[in-house]
Image: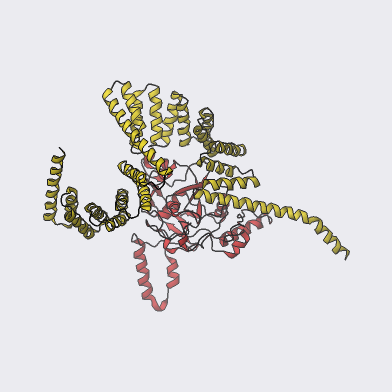
Chain colours: A red, B yellow
Amino acid sequence: MNTFYLSRNRNNSNYFLFMARYLILLLLSVCPGIAVFAQDAENMIRIPAGTFTMGSDNRAADEKPMHKVYLDTYYISKYEVTNAEYYEFWKQQAVSAQGVPQHTPENFTHLPQIGDWHERAKRFPNHPVVGVSWHDANAYAAWKGMRLPTEAEWEKAARGYTDRVWPWGNAIESYANTAASDDGYKGGLAPVGSFPKGKSYYGVMDMAGNVWEWTADWYSDVYYWHSSQAFTKRPKKNPTGPTAGSWRVIRGGSWIDKISRCSTTFRFYLYPNLKTSFVGFRLAKTAEKTSK
Amino acid sequence: MRNWIKIVIFLWICLPFAGIADEKSDDHSRYVQHVEQGFAAIFQGDNQTAISEFEAALVIEPDHYEILHYLGMAYDQQQFWNKAAESYQRSLALMPDNVEALYSLGVVYFKLDKWVDAVPVLERVVALSPHHARGYEILGKSLVKLRRYAEAVPILTKAVTLKPRAAGTYQELGTAYLNIKEYTKAIENFKKALAFGPGRYAEPHHGLGTAYLRLGEREKSRTEMQIYQQLQKEFAEYERLTRLTRAEPDNIEAWTGLATLLMNQKNYPQAVQVFQKCIELAPDNANFHHGLSRAFMALNYPKHAAEAAEKAVRLMPNASILYNTLGSTYAMQGKRRDALAAFQKAIELDSEQPYYHLNISKLYQSFGNQKLAQEHYRAYEHLLSQQKSKQQ
């Protein structure tokens, strides 16, 4: 746990200082509100098992009812998948398919600030990859030995254990790349992690704005009624959404959206084969269960 | 040398084909651009631009069932229902069992009063997607419109099972039961419609009135019908004022009337918008800032409420009620010292208002000052009883 800190600071000549810092960190990690969550080399943040509140009774109809959901421990990527990361996958796909490129992101010739795939992969390696369909995102995740987050996993990582309207809290702030002009990225994407103040309770970045993110779930406007206690009398465990549908859920809002659409509970949907300049994705994986 | 000439001739022959490839790629780029701009417009609520962009995209690449569906949805939003139906039909021709496009088509048939056409489409929706609550709901409503009440009952029952607390569906279910003369069940469902519906929901009261009448409970029936008529009157006034503000956007009296009506109806989110419009038209009117503050308070936004109340006080520094509101906004934020100063000022300006004393009494109690708390509570009781006896 917290090994990133250890490797950076361990110094024989200053062992006491290291120990003091380590103990403080250990204390912080168990103290609610200022917790530091573990992340591994792949920048995956560990979200501890437990119940959280999903949905909202005061916002859109499809966010009702607010309900408790239990999730096992899982990991979610700290950042959205970048052009550079996706490029590695895309190159390998081209090789394995005898030079015929597969899962190629869409070109956006009319948007110079995003541009065509080859161009942006080189010019903007740290921008989130866009122009990818749900199928592309899913293929990338499988290639990495991971998967897309479920809608519930996405929401828990964004809102934490309290009801935060935005990942950083309840006040309207310029801590995300939205359609607003005061965030410093008007009319285009921002490199991932550009808004450290906008991180979620768990330390996950860019969960509001920049790009919408594909989730694993099919969309249904009434699914929350079925994953809530309204029918089961106890919190639904690890819900994975409806079994079928037309649209996949996207979350988080994007650079073309108002901040109200970038809330932690706002749900939207898109046909899974569409490739647009405002939808990207991040990864998740299930934590291995330790045997008792 | 000859080989070079051959190569040049070959390339010259191939040149037009290269052009075709370029043209195709250019066309696709233009298609992408139109789709992107269509989505951006939809996200900003500009459906008219979305329609133009999606139409332009489909001229270039016509076989995108998903873009046809989005085009239909944009037409639907603009209330061009025939055009919406046409787009959905084109989308379904390419992808016949697309549940959401089928549902959209069913809804648009319903809006066009083509209930006979809506029924088979929606039956297909629920057959393909047995948990499609909206599908059941509109199918049930279509059956009620077609007076096929007995068939509507199980469909609407399924809809409320899938989506509980859907007031409109309970209203339809009540209507269906009423028409098959199951009055007790009708009453049960109309009551649920009222319980889950928005405030001032009129129709269930009419349903209840009718059901009670058929059961011979005349008094209950009369009461429900009176409520219904009162709500209908309010609704007519709301419609009149809304139309007036639309026709005459600078008519401050119409906006004021609408704001007052919305506050009476406890429709605070809309009241906020209307008060903001009033302030836009008359920024120096303290009453509008005060109204905005009260609406924000009711919505539990004390910070916004305090800002509005502070503006109102600056504009009308001798109005006691404004200080009372300001004090309440501070108290809601936990700023007890500021709240105390504001309540004291309110009482200084008008010591005859019972509720000013009640507010300050509660505040003193929170400070632990029981003596002053009790003193003001007694003043509150005394003034309230005086007011009541005057009214009598």
Q: Position of residue A23 (x, y in %)?
A: 35, 68
Asked whether residue A275 is in view, the answer is: no
Q: Is residue B187 above or below residue B361?
A: above
Could you tell whether A244 is left or right of B201 in the image? right
Q: Residue furthest right?
A: B2
Q: How many marks?
A: 0
Q: Quadrant of the C terminus of chain B?
A: top left
Q: Is residue A283 above or below residue A236?
A: below
Q: Nearer the viewer, residue A155 or B386?
A: B386
Q: Residue furthest bottom?
A: A13
Q: Position of residue A37 (x, y in %)?
A: 41, 61
User: Going 40% across and 29% down the picture, which residue do you hit?
Assistant: B173
Q: Position of residue A275 (x, y in %)?
A: 58, 51
Q: Nearer the viewer, residue B324 or A265?
A: B324
Q: Quadrant of the N terminus of chain B?
A: bottom right
Q: Is residue B43 above or below residue A36?
A: above
Quarter of the figure with residue A91: bottom right
Could you tell whether A105 is left or right of B335 in the image? right
Quarter of the figure with residue A8: bottom left
Q: Nearer the viewer, residue A99 or A125?
A: A125
Asked whether residue B186 is in view, the answer is: yes
Q: Position of residue A146 (x, y in %)?
A: 52, 54
Could you tell whether B215 is left or right of B91 in the image? left
Quarter of the figure with residue B157: top left
